[in-house]
Amino acid sequence: MSDLVAGMLSLALAFAGMAALAFAMERHYEQLTGARALPPARRLRCLGAALLLVSALPCVRVWGVTVGSVAWLGFLSAGAIVCVALISAAPRWAARAAAVVGAAAVLALGQAFAR
């Protein structure tokens, strides 16, 4: 796996994880669905936390633990910034983008680790 691919995977997973955590909050869930009830909050929190943890794998694999952990923190920050910008501009589009990007990144990560 190249540096560019690892960075893109980590950023995509961090964005999807941050979006899942954001939509687990009442305010953003209401922006997304129009409903105040928050039924999938626990599942969204678990999914978001899992995606954020998995986003560390490409960084650690390519750059090692020391540099990879610092790069991972940078990708977490970048994913959070992208998530905030998209949710404030278009919450439904941000949710769709997070779902597509997150699923594609998980599939690509599975393929990369299978080799």
Image (spheres, rainbow, N blue to C red):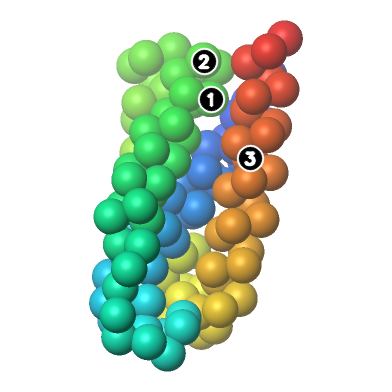
| Residue lying furthest bottom | 34
Q: Nearer the viewer, residue 39 or 81?
A: 39
Q: Which residue is mark 1?
A: 58
**Which image quarter is the C terminus in?**
top right
* Residue shown at the point (46%, 81%) measured from the top left: 32
x then y, percent, for residue 110 = 64, 24
x then y, percent, for residue 60 = 45, 19
Of callouts 3 and 2, the N-terminal one: 2
- The residue type indicated by label 2 comes to Arg
* Residue shown at the point (64%, 52%) measured from the top left: 101
Q: Nearer the viewer, residue 72 or 106?
A: 106
- The residue type indicated by label 3 comes to Ala
Q: Secondary structure at mark 1?
A: helix
Q: Which residue is mark 3?
A: 105
* Residue shown at the point (37%, 55%) measured from the top left: 44
x then y, percent, for residue 84 = 41, 70
